[in-house]
């Protein structure tokens, strides 16, 4: 991806130098187990009952900070570029875009939705309208998921910013109400929410491509990342079998397909995974 190093976004919040300790709830532990290999949930929850375990205090050495600075500047670029795209999109629709903030942390951090952990992967918290990520996840994306490349990383961030767009549009809240009223459809609705965020990531990729920011192979990297975190791929890797009924994010084919749909159309209206609304 074409970008110029040289600065940090004003919407970047760096907590990597802070130690953080605190109890982890049973609910939080379960979420961590489920989400250790996939993107974060739409909302991070804490079960409220402590198990006695805790986060270790995690800081950031000057050497680690210097080593990660190019990545910090890259995610800053993607954050600003994606949000500029959505700002223009909202403006064309006659509304106003409110930017999210990207929080960098190491190990664990407090969020408006409860305790956040690195093992949860990147996630969006609608209650404080922030995206959270431990940059070490990108190493996992390469080594564990087999999805290397800077645009694979950009896709991850664009997906989470897509959740912020959903929040501004009220989609996530409508989905939660629908899940509460129809628990049997909760997983299906979760999949549709995630696939829409994938499509929104594709909408940004379309804009970036139109502006000459993409290089040969970038879209393939994005598709590789979207496929690598499909529920079927993760279930096969972790359990050896696939259970479609337990999907929460969509299959590899679905995730790649909806990302490509957004990329080819470049129009958020093409991202209606709910068949007319929810």
Image (cartoon, rainbow, N blue to C red):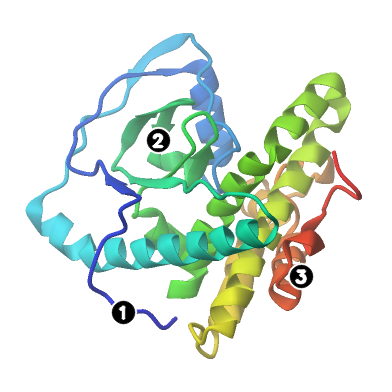
Residue 77 figure quarter: bottom left
Q: Is residue 171 left or right of residue 15?
A: right
- Marks 2/3: CA distance? 32 Å
Q: Which residue is mark 2?
A: 117
Q: Which mark is residue 227?
A: none
- Indicate the position of residue 50 as horizontal and vertical percent values: 43, 11
Mark 3 / mark 1, whichever is N-terminal: 1
- Marks 1/2: CA distance? 30 Å
Residue located 14% across and 62% down the image: 66
Residue 262 figure quarter: bottom right
Residue located 70% across and 61% down the image: 199
Q: Is residue 88 left or right of residue 252?
A: left
- Marks 3/1: CA distance? 28 Å
Question: Is the residue marked by circle 2 packed among few (<14), some (14-19), or many (20+) residues within 10 Å?
Answer: many
Image vertical order of residue 95 relative to residue 81, above or below: above
Mark 1 / mark 2, whichever is N-terminal: 1
- Indicate the position of residue 169 as horizontal and vertical percent values: 68, 43
Q: Which residue is mark 3?
A: 261
Element at label 2: strand
Q: Which mark is residue 4?
A: 1
């Amino acid at each position: 991806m074409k970008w110029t190093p040289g600065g940090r976004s004003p919407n970047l919040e760096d907590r990597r130098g802070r130690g953080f300790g605190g109890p982890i709830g049973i609910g939080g532990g379960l979420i961590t187990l489920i989400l250790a290999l996939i993107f974060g949930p739409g909302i991070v929850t804490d079960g409220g009952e402590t198990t006695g375990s805790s986060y270790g205090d995690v800081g950031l050495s000057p050497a680690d900070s210097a080593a990660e600075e190019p990545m910090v500047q890259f995610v800053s670029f993607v954050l600003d570029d994606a949000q500029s795209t959505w700002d223009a999109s909202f403006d064309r629709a006659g509304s106003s875009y409110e930017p999210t903030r990207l929080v960098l942390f190491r190990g664990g951090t407090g969020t408006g939705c409860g305790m956040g952990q690195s093992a949860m992967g990147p996630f969006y918290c609608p209650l404080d309208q922030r995206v959270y990520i431990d940059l070490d996840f990108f190493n996992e994306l390469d080594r564990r998921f087999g999805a290397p490349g800077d645009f694979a990383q950009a896709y991850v961030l664009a997906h989470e910013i897509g959740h912020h767009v959903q929040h501004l549009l009220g989609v996530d809240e409508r989905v939660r109400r629908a899940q509460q009223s129809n628990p049997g459809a909760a997983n299906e609705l979760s999949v549709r929410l995630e696939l829409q965020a994938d499509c929104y990531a594709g909408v940004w990729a379309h804009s970036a491509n139109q502006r000459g920011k993409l290089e040969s192979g970038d879209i393939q990297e994005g598709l590789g990342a979207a496929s690598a975190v499909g529920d079927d791929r993760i279930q096969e890797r972790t359990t050896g079998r696939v259970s479609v009924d337990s999907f929460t994010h969509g299959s590899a084919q679905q995730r790649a397909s909806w990302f490509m749909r957004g990329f080819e159309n470049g129009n958020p209206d093409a991202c209606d995974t709910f068949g007319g609304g929810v």
